[in-house]
Amino acid sequence: MTDLDYRMIGTRIRAYRRERGLTQEQLAALLQTSRSNISHWENGRTLPDIETVKRLSRILGCNFLDGREPTEAKDEP
């Protein structure tokens, strides 16, 4: 994966988190991780592991790796 892919995924995580009205601290608590991990993901420095991706998808109600923008994914039934 390239740096651009990391940034794209991080941007999606941030957008879905904000759409749900969660702070980084709140999302970190739900995932039982640190706020700095959330920040690193959102800024494209690192990626969450696959188990965390699954939990993120459940918590945020989305599949942020599917290539759609948050508002596009939200509009589907």
Image (spheres, helix red, strand yellow):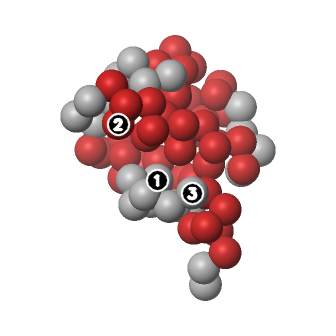
Rendered residue at 66%/75% (across/down): 75
- Relative to 11, say whether 64 is above or below: below
Q: What element carries label 3?
A: loop
**Location of residue 37 in the rendering, given as x and y in whole percent from the top left corner:** 46, 21
Q: In which quarter of the image is residue 50?
A: top left
Q: Give the residue number, with chain letter if any, for mark 3.
A: 69
Question: Which residue type carries mark 3?
Answer: Glu
Q: How many marks?
A: 3
Residue 34 visible to the viewer: no
In this rendering, is residue 29 above or below 75?
Answer: above
Q: What residue type is labelled 1?
A: Phe
Disc 2 residue type (three-letter): Asp
Give residue 11's position: percent from left, percent from top.
54, 37
Residue in view at x 52 percent, y 15 percent: 36
- Specify whether residue 12 is in view: yes
- How crowded is the residue under tag 1: few (<14 C-alpha within 10 Å), some, or many (20+)? many
Marks 3 and 2, how far apart at CA: 14 Å
- Quarter-of-image position of residue 35: top right
Q: Distance between the residues labelled 3 and 1?
A: 8 Å
Q: Which residue has dot 2 on it?
A: 5
Task: Work out which residue is located at the far right of the displayed protein and give it.
Answer: 21
Say whether disc 3 or disc 2 marks the residue closer to the N-terminus: 2
Farthest left residue in view = 1
Residue 64's disc number? 1
